[in-house]
Image (tube, helix red, strand yellow):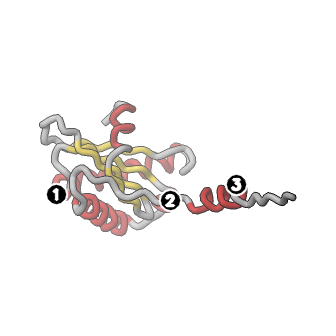
């Protein structure tokens, strides 16, 4: 995958967060059984040498595991995390297998449930509803 629109579309798909990366999977629905993959590592992770090392490692993992465990007709995106920089390669392989199985366990159209941000709710409760009227 090389187009930004493909990466943005994959972001609306299913996700499986792992310590070293986040896996996004989205079925394209175009009838093509080919599996595509993309890799992204931001500058927050490190310099060019570190980002390229992570991308090389992810590329090898994707070529090894996607034909066996991937979703046919889907886009797969690996997003690098800072914990994945010096992570053992065998551990990354196991995490990717686990993530692919986790994604496959959900029905096709179902996205994972979103967590509610409790800090925003607490803030709303403390600012808006603490009003009392004292009158006469």
Point out residue 61 in the picture as x, y percentages from the top left corner.
29, 55
Q: Residue at x 61, y 56 (%)?
A: 120
Q: Residue at x 29, y 49 (%)?
A: 25
- Quarter that holds the N terminus: top left
Task: Give whichever of discs 2 and 1 has the lower sequence position.
Answer: 1
Q: Which residue is drawn at 70% across and 54% down?
A: 128
State which quadrant residue 99 falls in: bottom left
Label placed on residue 116? 2
Label placed on residue 128? 3
Q: CA gap, disc 2 to disc 1?
A: 35 Å
Q: CA gap, disc 3 to disc 2?
A: 19 Å
Q: Residue at x 16, y 41 (%)?
A: 34
Viewed as shown, does residue 54 lie left or right of 119? left
Task: Give whichever of discs 3 and 2 has the lower sequence position.
Answer: 2
Residue, disc 1: 68
Q: Is mark 3 on a helix, strand or loop?
A: helix
- Quarter that holds the C terminus: bottom right
Q: Is residue 93 above or below residue 10?
A: below
Q: Nearer the viewer, mark 2 or mark 1?
A: 2
For disc 3, the neighbor class at 10 Å (few under 14, some 14 to 19, many from 20) is few
State which quadrant residue 15 falls in: bottom left
Q: How many marks?
A: 3
Q: CA gap, disc 1 to disc 3?
A: 53 Å
């Amino acid at each position: 995958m090389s187009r930004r629109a493909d990466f943005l579309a994959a972001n609306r798909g299913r996700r499986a967060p792992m310590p070293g990366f986040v896996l996004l999977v989205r079925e394209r629905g175009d009838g093509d059984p080919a599996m595509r993959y993309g890799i992204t590592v931001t500058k927050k992770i490190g310099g060019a040498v570190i980002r390229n090392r992570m991308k090389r490692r992810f590329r090898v993992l994707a070529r090894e595991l996607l034909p066996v465990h991937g979703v046919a007709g889907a886009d797969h995106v690996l997003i690098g995390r800072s914990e994945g920089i010096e992570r053992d390669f065998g551990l990354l392989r196991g995490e990717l297998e686990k993530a692919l199985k986790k994604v496959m366990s959900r029905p096709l159209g179902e996205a994972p449930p979103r967590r509610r941000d409790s800090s925003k709710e607490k803030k709303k409760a403390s600012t808006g509803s603490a009003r009392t009227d004292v009158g006469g």
